[in-house]
Image (cartoon, helix red, strand yellow):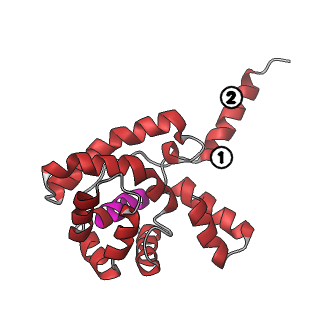
Amino acid sequence: MISLAIFLLFFCSKAKTYIIMDALYRDIIPSYLWPVNYSVNGQRTFFKNISYYCSLLISELKIETSLMPRLKRFLELEGVNLLQSFFIMKLNFDCNFFMFTEILTSQEKYQTVIKCLFSVISQTKNLETLILLGPDDPILLSEFINNTTRFSLQTSYKKMRFKIKHDQPCNFFLTKSMELQRQTDTFDP
């Protein structure tokens, strides 16, 4: 999230950055992945989804089953960070631009975020790097940056033809205002 804010601050004022980040999180990211909610319940929900994501990678993209533990561990360590940042400063600028454009122009935005994550992971060089270094290696993401080009990302993204089940994002401010309304409805002076 911080890397996304820094990136936006290069191009926007503080106020515009806040408005853009609010819109991105409200409209795209499910509430259990918001930094304010991620502590225990959000983490539990995301970890349940990881097994589903790994099974999709294996069944739909024909990735070897033996990679399941490494993929799962990588998603546990880096998945939330990558999703919360929309990959900003995690890949080169050209790849980020492509992914951000796909996310913002898509009708199913969060599904596109997950497909972008799959596109990065499923590239042959990145899978080889995951096998060679292991999911716990601190230089794994930097190797992904070096291995991922816009062309390879576009090619990999076009192969993503399947639907991903996911939780819908909800409006944090609407949810909070509903909570406040309920509290004031039950308030008896």
Q: Which residues are magenta?
A: 109-119
Tell which circle, 1 or 2, labels the residue nearer the N-terminal end. Answer: 1
> Element under label 2?
helix
Residue 19 % position (x, y): 67, 63
- Residue 142, compared with residue 78, is above or below; it is below
Name which residue lies at 32% across and 53% down.
135
Residue carrying label 1? 173
Q: Decide which of 179, 120 is in the foreground and name it.
A: 120
Classify 10 Å Cα crowding around label 2: few (below 14), some (14-19), many (20 and above).
Answer: few
Residue 85 colored in magenta in the image: no
In the depicted view, which residue is nearer to us: 67 or 37? 67
Q: Amino acid at mark 2?
A: Arg
Q: Is residue 145 visible?
A: yes
Front-most of residues 126 and 153: 126
**Residue marked by disc 2:** 182
**In the displayed structure image, the side of residue 31 where residue 52 appears, left or right:** left
Residue 66 x/y as whole percent: 14, 49
**Could you tell me how many numbered marks the image carries?**
2
Residue at x 20%, y 69% (from the top left corner): 124
- Left or right: 5 as drawn, with respect to 146: right
Up the image or down, 66 lies above or below 157; here it is above
| Helix, strand or loop for the magenta stretch, by majority | helix
| Left-right relation of 135 to 168 | left
